[in-house]
Image (spheres, grey):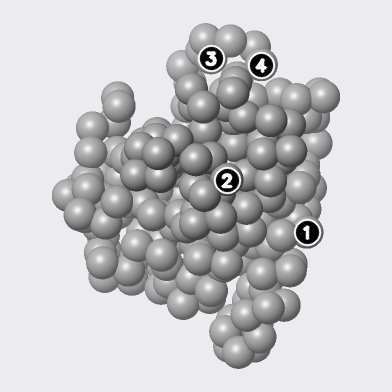
Amino acid sequence: MTSRQFTPRRSSLCALLLSVLWCVAFTAQAQQAPQQLIEDNVAALMQKLDGRKDYYAEHESELESLVDDSLDDVADFRYIGASVMGRYFSNASPEQRSRFVDTFRKTLIETYAKGLVTFDYRDIRVLDNDSEQRYEDQASVDMEVVSTNGDVYPVVYTLHQRDGEWRVINVIVNGINLGLTFRNQFDQAMRDNNRDIDAVIDGWAPDVATDELEAGGDDDQ
């Protein structure tokens, strides 16, 4: 049932992943299981956007602000930023770490927000997962995004508990680990800029490796 195809409209599909993060933020509860949390809020997202897509398509700044305000409660950007910086994190100053987190978040939203209202999808399915989680404070949730032309995009969210609340720390789409992709991008940028971390932060723009995504990847990477 899983499709290995990926359309060239990568920004729109990645925006749809952002949309699930957005909708989770509305009713996040520590006592709620991660799978149920995302499942309940996918419905909340669809209701929130229903009848408003044309408006947000013409008022992108409002959409970006709405997403930005909501992501605080669902994505652990401090964890994600440290992971993307990888081995360079330990040598970065606290100011550089904070600045990269802010830059990463800002560019992610600016690049993908509009796709929330332009990607044509038919269904979003949260799949049952009966397997035991390896750690009590970590969980994964499997989803499928079905486009209007019938293509199926498998999505896996990784969450962990921080301060008693579940927060997303990574996403795998169509077999491609986006966190790892961004980390490789950061590493390459450091090489290209002679290890000048400030130059890397100043020039940062998210890139999800178009060719790789179109081909798909291995689920276990």
* Mark 2: few/some/many CA within 10 Å (<14, 14-19, 20+): some
Task: List the residue tagged with mark 2.
Answer: 198
Query: Marks 4 and 1: which is nearer the front?
Result: 1
* Mark 4: few/some/many CA within 10 Å (<14, 14-19, 20+): few
* Mark 3: few/some/many CA within 10 Å (<14, 14-19, 20+): few
Q: Name the mark on residue 133.
A: 3
**Of the residues shown, which amino acid type is indicated by label 3?**
Gln
Q: For residue 148, which quarter of the picture?
A: bottom left
Q: CA distance from mark 1 to mark 2?
A: 26 Å
Q: CA distance from mark 2 to mark 3?
A: 38 Å
Task: List the residue tagged with mark 1.
Answer: 69
Residue at position x 58%, y 10% in the image: 135
Q: CA distance from mark 4 to mark 2?
A: 33 Å
Query: Marks 2 and 3: which is nearer the front?
Result: 2
Task: List the residue tagged with mark 4.
Answer: 137
Query: Marks 1 and 2: which is nearer the front?
Result: 2
Q: Quadrant of the N terminus?
A: top left
| Element type where label 2 sits in the image | helix
